[in-house]
């Protein structure tokens, strides 16, 4: 009989996500049937067979001349014609932000690289964005869309944000990302923004941009419907990379994401409904995937959850968490399904990570994970942390009920499980079903958790009972 260790090796090297145990036919009450229904109703945008090549609108190849105006003219012509593709041919193209409009597919050809300007003034005027879960007026994201329908970024080319320890990343205020004592950073503006959010300052008065040092997101569709980003490579992001906000029907497929800078989360759907993330590769300086729904007071004002998220077939390398829920989750998160993923790196902190606190609050639950192969992670296979940042200092009670892991194998970690609620916010209904965690150095931590069930869980080859 194939051992779990051999099965882990097979899953990691071949990518075949075979279940650890034989599975019966799906029952009528199988929660995974809901994942199929979510995927079935997500609308993939379709576009007329019309091409608008950026060179026809004045774009110059070579990466030296800014093509911002040419890209904008191509987008305008495309949407006015009823839709189609804005085509970036092979070569290197320098531009400021690209603003998509309804029925436009930005197609980045194979062997094409779009390099985004490092001149901060190019990202003005300010636009409505969400920065670490709080709405404000800030620099335009590198690719942005507002209240558009049927939009896409596709192709096999590369989108390069050109962030480095010289541009964008030093604003984090960390020396390992290029910041030096006496140079500016984001801290003052970040604190001012969070205070504005908690004070319910009108969003139109939350003005940032030049002199504030809040880095822009890479790709941010805002209040959009039927969104697709597929096939392209994203690298060197200033900040969060794929960040749909208040969107419905989103597909993120076949991306290669490679950014080692601060807060370069790979994919952060925030207050979105019906999202599919599949067959993507993440190598990030923060969480690979992080599901969010607003921060603290501003999250309670907007009060829109993220719900109906399906993740499958993804590969996670470096990062803080493979699949993360939080920490900006005040609006709540419901119905998350992740399966058939591979995670493996000594610089990946956690495989499955849920982070919250008593400043956020939020109602979370109905999370399902299955058939996930973890080579190694630095901290834990499953981390639930209600002590994140402010911990229990706030007046709100985070709720988490219903986290189910099935057929998860891991080859190395410090902890198998690190699950910690709060004395007045107890985590409920955590189930691990036929999981095997090997080379675990420090066992498990379980605090303020009720209703934990282990069915066939082994750690270092030995059966483990629920505490």
Image (cartoon, helix red, strand yellow):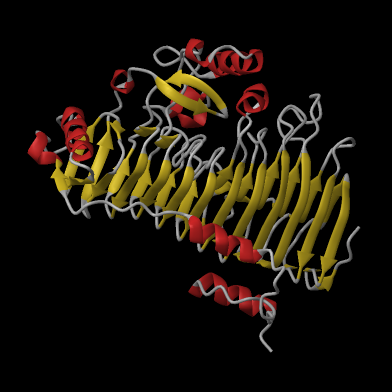
Left or right of 453? Residue 153 is left
Nearest the viewer among 451 and 344 is 451
> Which of the two residues, 401 or 175, is positioned nearer the viewer here?
401
Residue 196 in the image: x percent, y percent?
60, 13
Q: Residue at x 76, y 53 (%)?
A: 402
**Quarter of the image where the N terminus is located:** bottom right
159 vs 87, left or right, is: right
> Do we see residue 178 in this rendering?
no
Can residue 203 be seen here? The reply is: yes
Q: How many marks?
A: 0
In this view, 413 is above or below 135: below
Find residue 326 and report its image quarter.
top right
Q: Quadrant of residue 166?
A: top left
Q: Position of residue 90 (x, y in %)?
A: 16, 50
Residue 97 point in image, percent of width and height: 30, 30
Residue depicted at 37% across the width and 49% down the height:
229
- Apparent side of residue 202 relative to residue 439 in the rendered image (left or right): left
Q: Where is residue 287 in the image (x, y as percent from the top left)?
A: 56, 44
Q: Is residue 321 left or right of residue 426?
A: left
Quarter of the image with the C terminus in it: bottom right
Residue pictured at 68% horizontal, 63% vertical: 31
Q: In this view, does 382 lie above or below 141?
A: below
């Amino acid at each position: 009989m194939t051992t779990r260790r051999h099965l882990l090796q097979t899953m990691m090297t071949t990518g075949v996500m075979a279940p650890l145990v034989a599975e019966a036919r799906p029952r009528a009450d199988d929660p995974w049937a809901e994942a199929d229904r979510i995927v079935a109703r997500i609308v993939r945008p379709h576009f007329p067979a019309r091409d608008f090549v950026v060179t026809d609108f004045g774009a110059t190849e070579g990466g030296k001349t800014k093509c911002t105006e040419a890209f904008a003219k191509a987008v305008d012509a495309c949407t006015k014609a009823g839709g189609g593709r804005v085509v970036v041919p092979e070569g290197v193209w320098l531009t400021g932000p690209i603003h998509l409009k309804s029925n436009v597919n930005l197609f980045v050809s194979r062997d094409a690289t779009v390099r985004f300007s490092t001149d901060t003034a190019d990202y003005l005027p300010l636009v409505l964005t969400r920065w670490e879960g709080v709405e404000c007026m800030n620099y335009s994201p590198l690719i942005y869309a507002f209240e558009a329908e049927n939009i896409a970024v596709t192709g096999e080319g590369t989108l390069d944000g050109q962030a480095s320890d010289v541009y964008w990343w030093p604003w984090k205020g960390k020396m390992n990302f290029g910041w030096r004592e006496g140079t500016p950073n984001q801290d003052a503006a970040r604190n001012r923004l969070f205070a504005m959010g908690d004070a319910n300052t009108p969003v139109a008065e939350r003005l940032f941009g030049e002199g504030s040092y809040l880095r822009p997101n890479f790709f941010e569709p805002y209040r959009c419907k039927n969104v697709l980003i597929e096939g392209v490579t994203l690298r060197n992001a200033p900040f969060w990379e794929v960040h749909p906000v208040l969107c419905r029907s989103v597909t993120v497929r076949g991306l290669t994401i490679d950014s080692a800078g601060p807060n370069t989360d790979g994919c952060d759907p925030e207050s979105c409904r019906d999202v599919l993330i599949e067959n993507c590769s993440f190598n990030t300086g923060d969480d690979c995937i992080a599901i969010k729904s607003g921060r603290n007071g501003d999250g309670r004002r907007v009060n829109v959850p993220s719900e109906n998220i399906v993740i499958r077939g993804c590969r996670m390398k470096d990062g803080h968490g493979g699949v993360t829920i939080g920490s900006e989750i005040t609006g709540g998160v419901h119905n998350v399904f992740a399966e058939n993923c591979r995670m493996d790196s000594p610089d990946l902190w956690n495989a499955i990570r849920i982070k919250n606190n008593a400043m956020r609050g939020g109602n979370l639950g109905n999370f399902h994970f299955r058939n996930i192969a973890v080579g190694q992670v630095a901290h834990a296979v499953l981390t639930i942390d209600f002590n994140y940042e402010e911990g229990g200092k706030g007046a709100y009670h985070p709720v988490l009920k219903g986290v189910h892991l099935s057929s998860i194998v891991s080859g190395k970690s410090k902890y198998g499980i690190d699950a910690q609620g709060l004395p007045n916010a107890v985590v409920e209904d955590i189930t691990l079903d036929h999981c095997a965690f090997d080379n675990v150095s420090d066992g498990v931590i379980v605090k303020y958790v009720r209703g934990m069930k282990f069915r066939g869980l082994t750690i270092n080859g030995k059966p483990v009972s629920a505490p």
